[in-house]
Image (spheres, grey):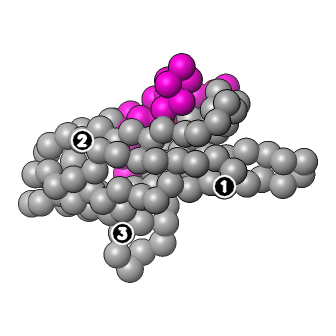
Amino acid sequence: QVQLAETGGGLVQFGGSLRLSCVASGSMFSTLDMGWYRQAPGKERELVANIPSPGRPNYADSVKGRFTISRDNTKNTVYLQMNSLKPEDTAVYYCCAVRTVGRAVIYDWGQGTQVTVSS
């Protein structure tokens, strides 16, 4: 199992910025596909952005041009830079690691970090 720990959430005003970080345990980080998901109250969890290994980042349409996902394999860390934040970005943000074991695809999740954008 991959242990994930997110930091960087908080309260920010409309138009502000935050950077989320997620540190992963173990020595497999460079081989993992990493992603950020979010879940707002009363809504289902949704993909915000992911960055395969190897591969190019992908973004939800709602965050394109505002959010940037990146990774530093030397630090076992994936980041989510969030700019031009809107109240509708308010949610709990979860880091996710995706790995394949045999034919099984396994998702490991962090505990989540709250992001609140005030209008």
Q: Residue at x 77, y 53 (%)?
A: 105
Q: In the visual, does 38 lie left or right of 119?
A: right
Q: In the visual, does 106 lie left or right of 79?
A: right
- Indicate whether 87 appears above or below 52: below
Q: What residue range appears in magenta?
A: 53-80
> In whole angstroms, how far apart are the C-alphas of marks 1 and 2?
25 Å
Q: Are marks 1 and 2 in contact (CB under 8 Å)?
A: no
**Residue in the foreground of this view, choosing between 52 and 76:** 76
The residue positioned farthest toward the bottom in the image shown: 42
Q: Residue at x 41, y 66 (%)?
A: 39
Within 10 Å of the Cα at label 1, are there few (<14), some (14-19), or many (20+) other Cα atoms?
A: some
At numbered mark 1, what does the secondary structure look like: helix, strand or loop? strand
**Residue in the foreground of this view, choosing between 17 and 101:** 101
Q: Quadrant of residue 24?
A: top right
Quarter of the picture holding the C terminus: bottom left
| Position of residue 113 measured from the top left corner of the image (x, y, whole percent) | 35, 56
> Residue 54: within the magenta?
yes
| Position of residue 16 measured from the top left corner of the image (x, y, whole percent) | 14, 43
Q: Which residue is mark 2?
A: 18
Within 10 Å of the Cα at label 2, are there few (<14), some (14-19), or many (20+) other Cα atoms?
A: some
Q: In the visual, does 13 lie left or right of 2?
A: left
Q: Which residue is mark 1?
A: 107
| Position of residue 95 measured from the top left corner of the image (x, y, whole percent) | 49, 49
The residue positioned farthest toward the right in the image shown: 102
Q: Which residue is mark 3?
A: 40
At numbered mark 3, what does the secondary structure look like: helix, strand or loop? loop
Q: Residue at x 36, y 62 (%)?
A: 92
- Indicate whether 71 appears above or below 95: above
Q: Amino acid at mark 2?
A: Leu
Q: Earlier in the sequence, mark 1 or mark 3?
A: 3
Q: Amino acid at mark 1?
A: Tyr
The residue positioned farthest toward the front in the image shown: 26
